[in-house]
Structures are given as C-alpha cells and as structure tokens.
C-alpha cells in the first residue's frame, strides 16, 4: 500500500515538477489535528511578540522599519511599548545595547530580513563581547518560500549562531510565546549576551492575508495541481493551528552563577593577609542583580585601591580616594594581591604579562573562558571563581568587617596620580601648532559637564585622551564599546542613554572619523525628542592610526580627512551646531554653556571643535 506522501514523491520525481515544494512533512498533518485553527481571526503573530515583551517590562523596541517586521512594530505600539526608529540598523542594535546596560534588563531591536540583519552583525558582535543582554528580532522570507529566491532571503542562522547565545527560527505561530520567553531568559542568564529570533513573514501576518498571498488562486490542473493545493492548505492550517490559545507570557527564572561559600572564604583569607592589594574592576561588576550603589559601599568599606574599566567607570564617583586613574602598570608591579573583578587578561592587560609573578591573584568572572584567558601562558590565578562579581564583592566586604587596607598604600598611589594629572594639566596649557589643544577642550568639558551626565565615547585618539581626563560622575554614567573597540556606537548609545535617563545630560565624545558613522542620527534625536550634546574632536584625520603609520611605514595613506563642517550637518538634521576654533579659546566656556542650554530646551547640539596635534599618549598602540 502506498501513502499520499510516497505518491507525491514518485510523481514529482517522474515529472520533475515542483520537486522541492511537494515532498511533504507528514508531521504537519499530525500537528494540525492536535490544535484547532481559527481561519477567521484577524489576529497576527506580532501581537504574541508584543505580549511577551510587555510582560517582561520591555519599554523600547529600536528598529529600522521593513515590511517583514511591521506587525511586530504595530503591535508593540498598541500595547504601549515605545518604537524608536533609527537611520541605520546598527544604530538600533547599539541603542538596545545601551538600554540593556543602563536598565539591567534586555535591550530589544527589530530589523528586517537580509540586508537589515547583515547591517546589524557588527553591533551584535559588539554586544556579545561587551556581555550585554540583547534580543535581536529579524524578519525572514515566508516559511514556504525560504531557499526559493524570495526577496531578502538568506541564511540568517549561519550569520548569528557564532554571535549569539541562542538562535531560533519560528516555524508556527504557537511557538512564538515560548520561544521569546526562553530567549529573554537565556540573554540574562550566566554571562549575559545577545540572542536572535528569526520571524518568517507568514508567522507574523493574519491568516487571511497570508493565505491570499501564498495559496495560488489557479493551481495547475490535474493530480499535481490538486496535490499542491492540498499541501498548501495543510501547511497553512498547521502554521496557524493553536495560534491563539492562552499561554504563559511571564518571565522565566534567570540563572546567575555565584561563588560558593568555600570560595568566598578563601578570598577573604587572601585579602586579609594582603598589605598592597589592588582591585581591577571590569564591566561585569555592574551587571544585575546587585545594585551599583551596594557595590560602591562594599568597595569603600574595603578601602582597597581600584582601577576601573569599561562600564565600571564612575562606580566610585568622580573624586574617590580609592580610585586610581594613572600608572596602573607600576601599581601592579608593587601589588602583593590583585583581584581581577570581571577584568580579563586580554590585550588590555598585555595578555596577563603586566601582572607580577609575585602577586597573589584572585580572578572572578561569570564566563569560564574569560576567567582563565591566557592563564596557560603569562599568569596563573591563585584562586579562580566562576561567578557574579558584584555579589562576591559585597560578600567580601561583609566577611572582612574590621579590615581596612593599610592607608599608606592607596595614599601613595593617589599621590602618584596627582603628580601625573598635574603633568597632564600642564600639557593642556601648551599651544598646539594650529587650532585648540584637545586636552584643554576636554578639561573644560569635564569642568562644565552636569553632575548627572552620561558620557558616551566613540572614537580613537580624541577618545583615548578623554578616558584620562573625563571623570564619570556615578555608576553607569560611562558607555564605551568594550573589548571589540567598535567605531560607530555613538549615536545608538546616546539614544538609548537619553531614553533611559531623560533628565540627564548625555554627551557623545566623538572623533571626527567616528562621527561619520552615526551623525545622521541627529535626525533621530530631533524626531524622537532626545536632545544630546556631541563634541567632535576635529583634527582632520584618523589620528590614532596616523600617529603610528607615518613613523613606522612612512605614509599617511587613507588617514587624512578634512576639517569638515560637522556643525552644519547637525543643523541640517534639525539639531544645532557650533564651530569652535583657536579664535574662540577665550569664549570656550560660553559656547559650551550655550550648547548645554540648547539641549535643556530640547535641541540636540554638536560642537565641532577644531583641534591640533599633541604628543599626549605617544607610544600607545592601536592594534
């Protein structure tokens, strides 16, 4: 006896007609009998997505619109989730990344199929390396048309599997709710990171529209035509079977690895015996669930000198007696104990070579591969803890009640700090060959910046200098790309930051090269009423690269730009631009205050600051 599926296969092999289309999946027919299908409903899959996002407290979805994802955007708007559209898909993902970092929840971006998703790849990789919990929603060709040459149909999974903790392609509408819930939990569990869900076109639109589009009005005559019509009908019934049955949309538990009691006790013993301990604090220190303020109190209670990096910048305020900003390499040579609190021994620590072999080393990280990076080559941990950094610091402080780091140690490091910073201030007063001294500009910005300011940095040489001079005012007041060193984060990070903190000043510190990636987002700032202040350090070049390339290789090829009128570009996008050059040196404070006033009154502003060259940071490398 031959069944219908075997018959279809034989016919298609004999005729050579529609062979890929009509080799059927018998499971479809079985699944369709388990659930009922409401062919009259006007509901659509986008509503299911929005329902889950709302239940998880998602406030924003960042996007660049496309027909593949329109139902999701419309449904989100209807349930009160703010849809924020940008001028580039990468900006949408960067904005979601910023929201994830500042809010402690999952950032969400939705982009269309094909080029929409390929444009998002760099931003997703940046989120992966920065350990930001992020949900990327992508459109896709309809399930029945994938692999057949549909518009913008590519293999999205092969792009995002190496970048994401979890990837899924929705095949029926009933899968949407459990898949989105699962993805959101995975994004936040363990080491946070991005997750990706692909939504084929026919899983998002209502039944009547999809059937009209995909079921042919006049199928071929004869047996083959009947079989095609039969298959398409069953495919549609299965696609929508059980689509609108009630499902739990509440958040799933999030797993966060914690240090064991034994590990905490060993750390307490090592710290208690240390005379010259140092803490290197990385971005993981400010991850949920431990509040940043609680971590600050724990660090102040310990009194151990701290070097802050990444998102941990600002956790001690701008003038803490235990925060050390300069001479890290020298401090590490003297230290008898180093606590790597979410800090990784990658290029930023010379792959571990800057650590002294005489130091005891406590390494704490949620990610085992980052915890032990390069430990087989240049360094060895005395104890390695795969667990949450913030909670361990709080436990250390509680377990070391009565302990306080010997005062001479942080005081000596702070004195070295003061000497170095005095030298930097003196260098800021030097006249450059032309235009303004970039250090003087940055010191003036730091003096005038509001106490609630959020600083977004996007660039090379100018931003490298800013990292030494600008002082974040508090926890989660500093946003940089992270270990990937990505240019172009500025517009998206600032957008996300301003939405999270609408009453705060949000500054972008741009290099003139990096500003080109996202200056078009001044249009977004204007349309969405998110006024920010951008400072473009305009030295007419890719100076971070030129500074090495010219002396090493004797050519400035591809490193030259022009003293472009970026302030005019900002004006054209609805913002307000100011030009500032050497002739404005005495009026610098007045111009900055004027820009701040414009921003408070609702206008995004850009300071196009013409700067000259200095030898500050000479010898620092960009590879």
Image: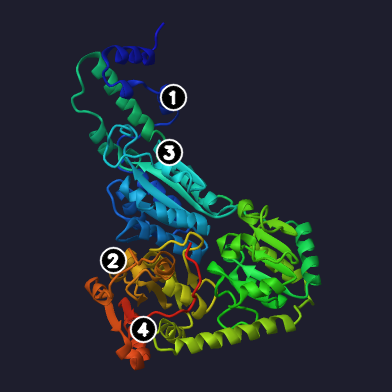
Seen from this angle, which residue lies furthest top? 1
Q: Whole-Å distance between the Cαs marked 2 and 3?
A: 39 Å
N-terminal label among 2 and 3: 3
471 left or right of 337? left
Disc 3 crowd rating (10 Å Cα; few below 14, some 14-19, many 20+) is many
Which numbered mark, 2 or 3, is in the foreground of this view? 2
Which is more toward the observer, 117 or 28? 117
497 left or right of 129? left
Q: Whole-Å distance between the Cαs marked 1 and 2?
A: 49 Å
Which is more toward the observer, 367 or 547? 547
Residue matched to label 4: 596
Residue matched to label 2: 520
N-terminal label among 1 and 3: 1
Which numbered mark, 4 or 3, is in the foreground of this view? 4
Q: Which circle marks residue 211 in the picture?
A: none
Residue matched to label 1: 27
> x and y percent of residue 210 in the render?
28, 37
Disc 2 crowd rating (10 Å Cα; few below 14, some 14-19, many 20+) is some
Q: Whole-Å distance between the Cαs marked 4 and 2?
A: 20 Å
Which is more toward the observer, 275 or 90? 275
Q: Secondary structure at mark 2?
A: helix
N-terminal label among 1 and 2: 1
User: Does any portion of residue 245 appear in the rendered image?
Assistant: no
Residue matched to label 3: 174
> x and y percent of residue 533 in the render?
36, 77
568 left or right of 422? left
């Amino acid at each position: 006896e031959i069944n219908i599926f075997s018959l279809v296969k034989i016919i298609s092999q004999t005729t050579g007609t529609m062979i890929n289309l009509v080799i059927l999946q018998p499971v479809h027919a079985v699944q369709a009998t388990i659930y009922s299908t409401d062919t009259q409903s006007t509901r659509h899959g986008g509503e299911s997505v929005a329902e889950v996002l709302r239940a998880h407290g998602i406030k924003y979805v960042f996007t660049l619109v496309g027909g593949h994802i329109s139902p999701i955007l419309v449904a989100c708007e209807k349930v009160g989730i703010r849809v924020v559209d940008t001028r580039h898909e990468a900006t949408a993902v960067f904005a979601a990344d910023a929201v994830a970092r500042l809010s402690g929840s999952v950032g969400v971006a939705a982009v269309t199929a094909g080029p929409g998703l390929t444009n998002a790849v760099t931003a997703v990789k940046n989120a992966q390396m920065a350990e930001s919990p992020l949900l990327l929603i992508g459109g896709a060709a309809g399930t029945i048309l994938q692999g057949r040459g549909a518009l913008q149909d590519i293999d999205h999974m092969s792009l995002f599997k190496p970048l994401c903790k979890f990837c899924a392609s929705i095949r029926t509408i009933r899968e949407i709710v459990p898949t989105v819930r699962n993805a959101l939990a995975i994004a936040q569990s363990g080491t946070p990171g991005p997750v990706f869900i692909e939504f084929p076109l026919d899983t998002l639109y209502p039944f009547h529209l999809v059937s009209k589009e995909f079921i042919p009005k006049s199928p071929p005559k004869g047996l083959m035509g009947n079989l095609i019509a039969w298959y398409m009908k069953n495919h549609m019934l299965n696609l929508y079977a059980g689509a609108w049955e009630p499902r739990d949309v509440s958040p799933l538990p999030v797993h966060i690895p914690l240090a064991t009691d034994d590990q905490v006790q060993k750390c307490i013993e090592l710290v208690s015996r240390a005379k010259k301990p140092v803490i290197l604090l990385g971005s993981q220190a400010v991850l949920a669930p431990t509040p940043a303020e609680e971590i600050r109190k724990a660090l102040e209670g310990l009194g151990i000198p701290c070097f802050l990096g990444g998102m941990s910048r600002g956790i001690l305020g701008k003038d803490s007696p235990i925060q050390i900003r300069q001479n890290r390499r020298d401090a590490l040579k003297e230290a008898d104990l180093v606590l790597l609190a979410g800090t990784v021994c990658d290029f930023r620590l010379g792959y571990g070579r800057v650590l002294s072999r005489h130091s005891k080393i406590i390494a704490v990280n949620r990610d085992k591969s980052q915890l032990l990076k390069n430990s087989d080559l240049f360094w060895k941990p005395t104890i390695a803890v795969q667990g949450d950094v913030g909670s361990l610091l709080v436990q250390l402080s509680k377990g070391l009640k009565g302990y306080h780091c010997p005062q001479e140690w942080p005081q000596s490091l702070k004195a070295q700090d003061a000497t170095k910073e005095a030298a930097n201030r003196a260098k800021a007063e030097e006249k450059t060959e032309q235009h303004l001294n970039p250090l003087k500009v940055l010191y003036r910005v730091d003096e005038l910046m509001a106490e609630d300011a959020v600083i977004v940095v996007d660039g090379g040489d100018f931003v490298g200098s800013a990292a030494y001079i600008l002082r974040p005012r508090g926890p989660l007041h500093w946003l940089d790309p992270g270990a990937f060193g990505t240019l172009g984060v500025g517009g998206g990070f600032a957008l996300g930051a301003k939405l999270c903190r609408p009453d705060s000043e949000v500054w972008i510190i741009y290099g003139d090269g990096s500003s080109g990636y996202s200056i078009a987002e001044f249009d977004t700032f204007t349309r969405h009423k998110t006024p920010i202040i951008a400072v473009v350090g305009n030295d007419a070049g890719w100076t971070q690269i030129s500074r090495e390339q010219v002396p090493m290789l004797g050519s400035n090829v591809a490193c030259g730009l022009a003293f472009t009128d970026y302030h005019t570009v900002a004006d054209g996008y609805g913002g307000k631009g100011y030009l500032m050059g050497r002739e404005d040196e005495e009026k610098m404070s007045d111009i900055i205050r004027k820009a701040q006033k414009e921003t408070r009154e609702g206008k995004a502003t850009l300071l196009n600051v013409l700067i000259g060259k200095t030898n500050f940071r000479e010898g620092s490398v960009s590879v």
